[in-house]
Image (spheres, rainbow, N blue to C red):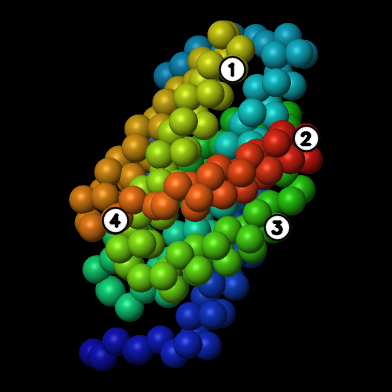
Amino acid sequence: MTTRRLTPLDRILAEFEHALRTAAAPGSHVASRANPARDSSAEALDEKERVLAGRLMRVNHAGEVAAQALYQGQAFMTKDPELRAAMAEAAAEEVDHLAWCEERLKELETPPSRLDPLWYLGSFAIGALAGLAGDRLSLGFIGETERQVVEHLDGHLGRLPEKDRKSRAILTQMKDDEARHGENAHRAGGVPMPGPVCRLMKFTSRVMTETAYWI
């Protein structure tokens, strides 16, 4: 039995379908791993704590939407099938993060960011540009992105209400996964990003996170 080779149009249509499923169908994602918050006690939050936790988790959900798009954009541009497979594996773990964040948002009665389609589109374009720069730079971009994500998650872990053990368990697992993705990218040959690029990445991330906190 022969395997059909995907045409450029096939790949574009597949990317469009993935974008719709990721950014426009909240609640549709299914995790392949158990939710790390499953064994955490659900201590009642007061209204102020619930709103804060919900907004922080909305930001993290938006970040996972963007992560999907970054990986998809980079995988779309690489010609290395092994690298594309590695990116697909990392993206699958990001789907777990999406599903966990969606579940927690529902529990916190907080909607996802209304700008998720914009985060996806912009991040896919950034990922595609990184992919065009070559595999070593693309891997370096992943490494730097994940380093900044770990830093961001540390900040959110410090801001979460002390009683919100469920969100804390989810973010802790996400942090471990993101750190591993960054290490894998460096081991695969990723090169350090120039300082100005790192600063631009951080500025872009800040715009998204501060906007998603409110919208």
Q: Earlier in the sequence, mark 3 or mark 4?
A: 3
Contact check, label 3 and label 1, Cβ < 8 Å: no
Residue 212: image location, x then y, percent = 71, 40
Q: Amino acid at mark 1?
A: Leu
Q: Position of residue 5 (x, y in %)?
A: 35, 89
Amino acid type at image mark 4: Gly
Of labels 2 and 1, earlier in sequence is 1
Tag 3 secondary structure: helix
Of badges 4 and 1, nearer the viewer stands 4
Pointers 2 and 3 in contact (C-beta within 8 Å): no
Q: Quadrant of residue 24?
A: bottom right
* Quadrant (top left/top right/bottom left/bottom right) for the N terminus: bottom left
Which of 126 and 112 lies nearest the eye of the viewer?
126
- Of labels 2 and 4, earlier in sequence is 4
Number of residues whose C-alpha sits closer than 10 Å to that of mark 3, classed few (under 14), some (14–19) or many (20 or more) = some
Identify the disc placed on residue 118: 3
- Of tags 3 and 4, the one toward the viewer is 4
- What separation in Å lies between label 2 and label 4 (alpha carbons)? 34 Å
Amino acid type, residue under disc 3 in the picture: Leu
Left or right, 182 with reference to 145: left
In the picture provided, is 206 more to the left or to the right than 214? left
Residue position for label 1: 160
- Ranked by sequence position, the earlier of labels 2 and 3 is 3
Residue visible at 26% across and 91% down? 2
Q: Residues within 10 Å of mark 1 (few under 14, many from 20)?
A: some
- Alpha-carbon distance for marks 4 and 1? 33 Å
Distance Cα–Cα, label 2 vs label 1: 16 Å
Closer to us: 170 or 214:
214
Residue 214: numbered disc: 2
Question: Are dots 3 and 4 in contact, CB under 8 Å?
Answer: no
Mark 2 residue type: Trp
In whole angstroms, how far apart are the C-alphas of marks 3 and 1? 26 Å
